[in-house]
Amino acid sequence: MLTSNYTGSTKPSLYNDAVMLNDLSRDELISRERALLERFAIHKEAGLALDLTRGKPSPEQLSLSDELDAMVGGEFRASDGTDLRNYGGLTGMSEARELGAELLGIGAEDVIAGGNSSLTLMYQYLLHAWLHGPLDTKTAWRLEPGPTKFLCVVPGYDRHFTIVENLGFELLNVRLTDSGPDMDQIEDLVSSDPSIKGIWCVPKYSNPTGHVYADNTVKRLAHIPKIAGPNFRIMWDNAYAVHDFDDNPPVLANIFSHCETAGTKDSVIQFASTSKVTRAGAGISFLAASQANRDSFIKTLGIQTIGPDKLNQLRHVRFLKNIDGIRVLMRGHAAIVKPKFDLVVQHLTDGLTSDSIGSWTTPRGGYFLSFEAPKGLATEIVRLSAEAGVKLTPAGATFPHGQDPNNSNIRIAPTYPSLDEIDQAMPVFVTAVSLAAVRKLLQSSEKHA
Ligand SMILES: Cc1ncc(COP(=O)(O)O)c(C=O)c1O
């Protein structure tokens, strides 16, 4: 479903060399390097200061929700008459829970509507499971005799990885394929190692590649707790559930339904937020889980807070109304964001296809796309781009501990810069990629000379 020339990290050999450049003689490579250095010098002289690192909405996107701010306007009661200015409502106002349920395609009874950040809820949940056990204290992960481990789908979201690193887990890389995480690898790992306690998943428009998990992957994931045991948790971060670019978006299978069929509903914890729908860092977060999980988690949550900011929830409910309201708003986002993704892809295609250097994804939604440089070159490409005034996410950032074993993945975040800025930044990136690739070939031809 992903339009892509990116084959996922299951076939790293494809990225090993710049195939077409390979055909050039040493003299041709030297003259190619000279031409690229001239182009690079022109980029440097332009004195650019551009940034392709920020995975956040642009001011134009944020302005789409400006009406939000006026939505409370002295009318502070929920539809059942509750005065939302006061303490209480640990699991959120009921209309906000319904909104979260529609966003995730599940029942409102399973949803907790929280504060401003789903990442905070993820941390709180994992800390709870670590200290007090996912369901009861006897199962607390901290009581495990040896090291505990967590599966990290790579390339992935750095903040997920640092949460489990912070809690003392050993992090195990799982390859991302075009249909989602490599399920054979996961099944092998969990069947031979009971110290693996969970997995991070960004199932729709995965950060940073934009992949959407295939139906069969979701189904197989729902069966993993049967191998890994009841203490295993799938951290299902559906951060980009509604961030579609087109009107016929890919449909993500419902993990709750698959878990219900497999008898593993207690093993999945779902998350989402409106951070990239309305206000980044000032939206509503959602956690959805089975009753047993919620009952257990709420005991810890209720010690940390008396309740979330329900007035923020109220303004969101009034502004967004329901899933149809969300979809209309997201069309506005797509109209701003998609041309930026298109422009990035256009530059990559025009600049790199004829030499067959690297590969990249063309997501149908979300916030990021992913570039796979020829093996070993990501750090050098990031360095060269910075030298010519274009800041990129550090190489390795999409892997646990910042260590990309192939040194090839680079995350590109097109939402924040303007079209004009992208149009200036991408030629620099393309030149940096070509220069790094040509130099690599020159070095190896030197060795073989
Ligand atoms: C996959 C993913 N999850 C969560 C977040 C952060 O969400 P929130 O703002 O709700 O904490 C991000 C932000 O980039 C993200 O990419």
Image (cartoon, rainbow, N blue to C red):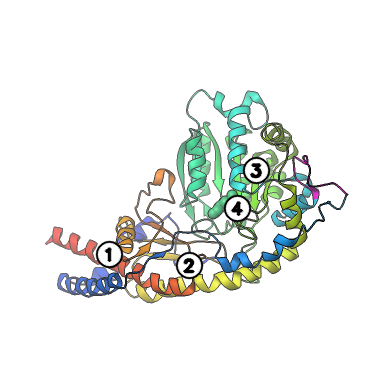
Q: Amino acid at mark 4?
A: Gly
Is the CB of mark 3 within 8 Å of ligand 1?
no
Mark pair 4, 2: CA separation: 19 Å
Depth check: give the residue in front, 169 or 174: 169
Q: Which residue, given by chain and number where applicable, does mark 4 sit on?
A: 281
- Pointer 2 local density, CA inside 10 Å: few below 14, some 14–19, many at least 20: many
Magenta residues (range):
81-94
- Give the number of the disc on residue 269: 3
Residue 136 appears left or right of 321 = left
Q: Is residue 60 magenta?
A: no
- Where's residue 326, x and y in %? 70, 63
Residue 176 appears left or right of 443 = right
Depth check: give the residue in front, 202 or 21: 202
- Image quadrant holding the N terminus, namely bottom right
Q: Quadrant of residue 353?
A: bottom left
- Where's residue 410, x and y in %? 40, 58
- For label 1, the SS is helix
Depth check: give the residue in front, 124 or 154: 124
**Residue at (60%, 43%) from the top-left corner?**
120
Closer to the eye: label 4 or 1: 4
Residue 60 vs 102, above or below: the answer is below
